[in-house]
Each structure stands twice: as C-alpha cells, then as structure tokens.
Amino acid sequence: MNWLIDFFGDAANWSGPDGIPLRVLEHLVFAGLSLLLAVVLAVPLGLWIGHTGKGAVLVVLSANAARALPTLGLLVLVVLLMGVGTIAPVLIPLVALAVPPILVNTYEGIRGVDPELRDAAYGMGLRGRQVLGGVLVPVALPLILLGMRTAAIQVVATATVAAYVGLGGLGRYIIDGLATKDYPRAIGGAVLVAALALAVQGLFALVQRISVSPGVSGRQRIR
Amino acid sequence: MITFDGVTKRYPDGTVAVDDLSLEVPTGEITVFVGPSGCGKTTSLRMINRMIDPSGGRILLDGVDVTTIDPPTLRRGIGYVIQQAGLFPHRKIVDNVATVPYLLGWDKKKARARAMELLERVGLDLRLAERYPFQLSGGQQQRVGVARALAADPPVLLMDEPFSAVDPIVRASLQEELLRLQAELNKTIVFVTHDIDEAIKLGDRVAVLRVGGRLAQLADPATLLAEPADDFVREFLGRDRGIRRLSFVPGDGLRLRGDLTVPVSAEVSSVRGTAEAWLVVVGDDGGPLGWIAPKDLPDSGTLAEVPAAPYGTFVRGRDSLRSALDAALLSPSGNAVAVDGSGRVVGVATREALDEALARVADGARG
Amino acid sequence: MGEEPLVRWDWIGRNWPEIQELLADHIIMALVPVVAGLLLALPLGLAGARWRWLYQPTVGTMNVIYSLPSLAVFIVLIPITGLATRATIIVPLTFYAMAVLIPAVVDGLTSVPEHVRQSAVAMGFTPLRRLLRVELPIAVPVVLAGLRVATVSSISLVSVGALVGRGGLGYLFIDGWQRQFPTPIVVGVVLTAILAAVADLLLVVAQRWLTPWSTARSRVREAA
C-alpha cells in the first residue's frame, strides 16, 4: 500500500512525457489503433467466411496459432527483424494477436444463427446483403462483441508487454520500474494497467447492453 | 395458378428428390403435398419460390417460368411460412410482420398499421405486437408467421409443415384458423405436411408423393379416400380410411322421418299408444330436448315432467354422413336428430336410413 | 545485422542442455496451473451448476480476473511470492485456467439433456451415482475442450514471466533481444508452439479415448 502512495502521491508522476495522463493516453491510442485495425480486418472477413462458408479452415488455424504463439516472443522477433524506430513493427504483432478472437467469434456467431432464420429471411425475399446485415449480424452481435472484447483485453495486455521493445504507454512504468528496481513505479503501473483493462471490460458490457436487441439478449437469458 | 411441368430435382451426388413431377395448383385453392420423409414434398414447395432451382422441367406461376424472375423479387410476392415460424428474434412482433412491406418500400406507418391489422386477423392480442418472439408461445409464434406471410397480400402462400411443431390442440385451432382465413382471402396455397389427417382436413386437393419424388395420386380428399390409386396410397391413408371417407359424404341424402317428433307440451296419454320405440321431444323453440321411450312412460302428466334420454344432432345441408352417424351413436335410440341451421328439429334419420346411406357409399366404393 | 541468418544452428547445438532446462521449467510452470485450476474448477463448477445463483457471481469474478493483463498480476504478486519464483507465475496462471474451466464445467454439466437426467432419476440412481455415472461423463467433452484452451493459453502465457525473471522458454526472448540475436527468439517461439501443439494433441487423444461416443467441441470461450 505504501508503495502505491509513493507512486500515485508523487506529483512528478502526474505531468510531463512520463506522467500518468500522457501514459494512459498513449496506451489507449496504441491499443485503440490496434483494435480498430483488427476489427477492420477481421469483422468483414469473419462475416464473409461465416456467410459463405468458404475458408473456415483459415479461422481454425488462426485461432490455434494465436493461442499457441507467445506474445512476448512474437513482439521481440518482429521488432528485432524490422528494426526499432517507427511504430509499425510493434503494431503488427498487436494487430495480429487481436485478429483471431474477432475473426473466430464473428465467424462462429454468423455460422451459429439458426438455419431456419436464414431460410425464412431468404424466403421472404431479402437479398444476401440484407440477410447478413438485417438478420445475421444483429442475431450474432453478442458473439461478435465478445470477440472484440477479448481482443481489446488482449491488446491492452500486449501493449503493456510491448514497452519492453520500446513502446510507450503504461508498460513503461513496469519495465522501467523493474529495470531500476523502483518497485513503487512498477506496481503503480501494474495497478493502472489492471484498472484500464477493467474499464475496457466495463465499456464493452455497456456497448453490449446498448447495441444488442432485447429480443436477442432476453432469449439468451432464458436459455 | 402454379404449374409443375415435368419438374425434376437431381442433386450432384445423384440422389433424386423430385422426379418428373407434373401437376397444377389451381388459383384460390389449398393444394396439399403429403408423403413420407424423402418424398420430395418440401423440395417441390421450395422450388416454387426458388429457394431451390429445379434441375429439369419448369415451374410456371400464372404462365411465367419462375426461373426468369429474380429470386428476391419473386419471393416478395409469395408468402412463406415454415415450421418453427423463423421469426427474427431481434425484431418486435409488429416489425416481424411488417418485414415484406418494409422491403417493398412502404412507409413505416402504413406497414405497421397493416401489420396490426394482420395480427388481429390471425387472432392475436394486439398487446403482443410490441413484444419479442421469445416472449410468445409456439402457437402464437406460428400465428405471427402466418401474419408475416400475408403482410404484403401476396396471391400465393407456401406453407412448409407450419403446424408440425405445436401440440395437437394448438395445431387443431391453427388449422381451423387457416380454413377461416382462407374462406375470406381465397389465396392460392401450397401446404406441405407429413400428416395425412391434416392433408385431408385442409386440402381442396391432395397430392400424395412417394419416396423418390414421384406423384402417386392427385385428387380431392373424398376421391382420395374412396379411390386410392394404388397400395402405397391405400397404406399411407391408414386403417380407418372408410370411416374418414364419410366426412366427405353429405348428410343431405339421408331419408328423414317427420313423424317421430312430439311437442313437449303434449299429454303423456296422447303418446302412450304409439308403436314407435323412441320419440324425440321437441321444445317450444323447436329445438330437441331428448329421446323418450313411450312404453316406459308414467300413466299421466305432460312430457315436460318426463326425464328425456341424451341425443345427438347433425345439421341438415351442412354436416356430413359421418356427423349423422356420430349423432346416431350418441342416442340410445340409435337414431340421429336432424336440425336446421338455427337448431330446429327437421326430422329424424333412423338406423334404417343410415344403413341405406352407408350401403350407397359402399356401392360407390365398389363401383 | 546484414548477413546474420535467422537461425544459427550451431548456437542451438551449443546451448541445447540449457534449452532443455528452460523447457522443463516451462512445462512445470504451464501445467501445474492447469491441473490445479481443474481441481479447483470441478467443485466450483459443480456448485455453480447445482446452485444457479452462484454461477453469475463466480463467472463475473472470473471474467474480471481473466481480463487482468498477466504482466500486471505478476508484478503485483512479487511482494508476496517473490521475484523470479515459480509461484509468481503459477498463482496467476491458475486463476486464468479457472476462468476458462469453471464455465466449461458448468456448461458441460448443464448440457446433459433433461430427459437423460430424468431417466437416470427414474431408474433409481442416487444423486451421487447420477453425477458420477451420467452427468460427469456427458460433461467430459465440453470440459476437455475447455482444458485444451486453458492448456494452450497457459503454455503461451508463461513466457511473459521472463520479464519478471522467470519465464521458462521466455528467457530466450529476453536473451535474444538483449543481444539483438534472433536465433534464441526463434527457438523459443518454435518450441512454445510445438509444446502447445503436442499438449493439444494429447488432450484430443484423451478425449477420443474417454468419450468414444462424442467428438463434440462446443461452447468454449475463445481465450487468447
């Protein structure tokens, strides 16, 4: 506890390039950017694979790979091979690790929609896009959002680790604190990262509540 | 009118779902496709709205080959009802019903008003309109499914085992409802079921299909029951085919006796001498009150004081021979009371009269 | 780096004994949490399946724990379990494993169809016998699917521990980065992936053997 007071109580930690507000902002920007890129890549691909049934093997492979590959190793390897300096080498592993959960859940969500529903939608004269956008996506939305939430949490965690290869953000406190044996700093950073992860979790719960139809969430509660 | 012209559906793996099917579905009638699993009845239905395309032959909708019409456009003009209703879980009931009107670009207010009208028409409480499908029972969902199919007032309705997933009581009421609606709307309906009783109850015409997708027989229910084309149809119709047939023989042909009735105000003494074993007591309003046996009557008093035995009635001009027979079996006399549309006694069909009528039916079956 | 090849095989040969030691350490730190997690998840999952009101709070807590970045948890534990100890890694990974396994156990148990449960009752099974002979066997495929996710995640998470001084094969990443030398990193990544693949395969075989009637693999949370 004293360590936390040492860290959070020190006014020097609240301003400047290494101050808490800027570090939080950095962390949010890196994580947000990675998540955005991952969503842009994975959601359309997952919708397409789930809707057409083509390329399902790709989904399984990417899910397995993402789970089995060590994030730290991937980060270190990519940055080492591509060189430090620009942000791109760090973003690549961040995005690559965020894509699979979104891809898998989007695909599973779309594929898992009751075939009767799909049948009814086509039978009433909806076109392919209308079936996808008007029926499949709203029904699969809880799973799609779950994928994004998993990816977001993943990205927040990986961005922390990425401080080791020079990325800014809250991981800096941890890595620098460990390097200089400044434990208050390391633990302060850890607490901030944990709080951020919980905030992200909460944000997604809110988004879910707002965007998922009561007809879908209510049905799940009953089951 | 929907015309199947040598329609075949063969899948790439060689299985034949429908084999050279030719038949006509007349406008304004219910045509039922019935048969065991694998007879291609659902496939045949789904080829009408191009959920499946035939691999041979043509399906004409009022003379136009359906494969020349863009599927979504075709489907918006054809109502479609499926087994589990297939309601969209994320939309309120009213919006589910308004799906096709929305697709056709109606404005929201008009589409919702139409949806409410239809919900009422299929017998649903309008308070359900703002609920979601998961909050409704299976039978209610199925009614919504029918309302949704009717929303844009399509001339043709395709119904694929729509009532199979609900319990028998709800199913019976949904069937009644459909017949009532059809009497008002006169849609061209193709109805698929595996239940021969449902087929006979609902169909103006019934197409029995056999496994492998071949038409075994196409006939109105009475003809089907009276003259099954072959052993397959006979077996499919089941054991009590003869009795069920009577449902399609009108009770009009029954010879009625008018001398077996007696007014409730009559004195006991006035009927004691009659030779008849049973008489119907008729109330002041002309309706039947029950049977009496003259030889068991007390010595004096009026008929109003005498307990009457239970009776069964059938409506002359509306009910079938089966109803008349049923009415006879419900009376200790073995005779059936015939009434008119307002419940007034018009005569009695005796056992002899029923016998004659049954003999005529049996003769018809022989010839 | 210029001419530096991605992998220098001679380095691997020279350091093989040390790599083996790291591998063994990695396996222990990855698998102990999975086994411990399973042992804890079984009673908690049973309780959650039995008393449904327990389920939501339990899963909610597990969700919160699951969302905490591993590095942050390692750091916070250091004052308690010590720097560079196995315990610092094993304790949080046990919680992560539980976060995956508790819902799997509950889902598995509740996936027993009601008519199967009813017929077991009707045949006179006592509650305990019913659990052991009917419900648990039917739950096995779902639990094993969860176990696969938990195991593979655990194996890949251990290496983050290298940042706090104890990460099994993760040490190779630190070593490679500090010397700007890719060979150890490649070795570490490849061995971790192989380890994960082998563990996954063993669990698939176990599932086939334990539940010859089913190849179900459903309703398992996607862990990353």
Image (cartoon, coloured by chain):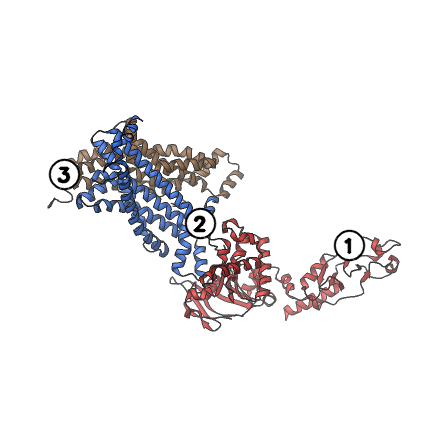
**Residue at numbered disc 3:** C11
Q: Is residue C83 above or below residue B78?
A: above
Label 3 neighbour load within 10 Å: few <14, some 14-19, many 20+: few
The residue at the far bottom in this view is B63
What is the drawing colour of chain C? brown
Residue C53's spot in the image, x, y percent?
47, 36
| Residue A194 figure quarter | top left
**Mark identifier at residue B342:** none
Q: Which amino acid type is marked by label 2?
A: Ser
What is the drawing colour of chain A? blue
Q: Left of C151 or right of it: where is A164?
A: left
**Residue at numbered disc 1:** B309
Label 1 neighbour load within 10 Å: few <14, some 14-19, many 20+: some
Residue C50's spot in the image, x, y percent?
47, 35
Q: Which amino acid type is marked by label 1?
A: Ala
Q: Is residue C222 above or below residue B262?
A: above
Determine the residue positioned at 74% across, 68% down.
B255
Viewer-proximal residue, A212 or B347? A212
